[in-house]
C-alpha cells in the first residue's frame, strides 16, 4: 500500500506529466493514458484485496475523478447533465410535433 501512495505522490506533479505528454493533450505515461493506468491499478487492487472490493473500487474511482479534475478540463456538470438533457429535449421536440 505504501508503494501505491508513493507512486500517487510521484505522479501528482504536473511537470512530471507535462514532460511525458504533448502540450495541450491528455497526459500519458509511456504512450498510455493515465486514466487507463489508474483503472488497471484499480482492477489489480480489487483482485489482490478481494475482501475489500468496495473500498478499493471507490478509492480507484476517486483517484480517477481527482486526476480528471486536476489535470484535464473535465467538467462533471456538462458531462452528466448535457448528456442527460439532450435526449429529453429531443423527446420533447418530437412529442411537441
Image: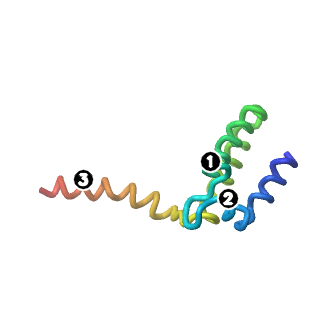
Label located before the other in sequence (2 or 3)? 2
> Which badge, 1 or 3, is on the more N-terminal residue?
1
Query: Is disc 2 in contact with disc 1, using a CB cutoff of under 8 Å?
Result: no
Q: Look at the picture and state if 44 lies above or below 38.
A: above
Q: Is residue 23 left or right of residue 50?
A: left
Verify CB contact (< 8 Å) between mark 2 and mark 3: no
Residue highlighted by disc 1: 32
Q: Which residue is mark 2?
A: 20
Check the image and tell me how it is coloured. rainbow
Classify the position of the C terminus by image quarter.
bottom left
The answer for how far apart the CA atoms under marks 2 and 3 are is 44 Å
Alpha carbon distance from label 1 to label 3: 39 Å
Q: Does dot 2 land on a helix, a strand or a loop?
A: helix
Q: CA distance from mark 2 to mark 1?
A: 10 Å
Q: Mark 2, mark 3: which one is toward the viewer?
A: 2
Q: What residue is shown at x 64% (from left), y 44% (from top)?
A: 39
x and y, in percent, of residue 66 in the image: 65, 60
Q: Which residue occupies 67% across, 58% down?
A: 20
- The mark nearer the N terminus, 2 or 1, is 2
Residue 8's spot in the image, x, y percent?
Answer: 77, 55
> Badge 1, how many Cα within 10 Å: few under 14, some, many 20+?
few
Name the residue: 53% across, 63% down: 74
At x 76% / y 37%, what residue is drawn? 52
Residue count near mark 2 (Cα–Cα under 10 Å), binned few <14, some 14–19, many ≥20: few
Instruction: Please state the total of marks drawn on the protein image.
Output: 3
Q: Secondary structure at mark 1?
A: strand
Which corner quadrant holds the N terminus? Answer: top right
Which of these two is toward me, 20 or 12?
20
Question: Where does label 3 land, which residue?
Answer: 91
Amino acid at each position: 500500500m505504501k508503494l501505491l501512495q508513493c507512486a500517487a505522490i510521484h505522479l501528482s506533479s504536473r511537470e512530471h506529466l507535462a514532460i511525458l505528454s504533448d502540450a495541450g493533450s491528455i497526459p500519458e505515461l509511456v504512450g498510455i493514458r493515465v486514466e487507463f493506468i489508474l483503472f488497471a491499478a484499480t482492477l489489480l487492487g480489487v483482485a489482490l484485496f478481494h475482501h475489500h472490493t468496495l473500498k478499493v473500487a471507490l478509492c480507484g474511482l476517486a483517484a480517477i475523478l481527482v486526476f480528471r479534475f486536476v489535470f484535464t478540463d473535465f467538467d462533471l456538470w456538462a458531462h452528466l447533465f448535457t448528456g442527460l438533457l439532450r435526449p429529453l429535449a429531443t423527446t420533447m421536440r418530437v412529442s411537441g410535433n
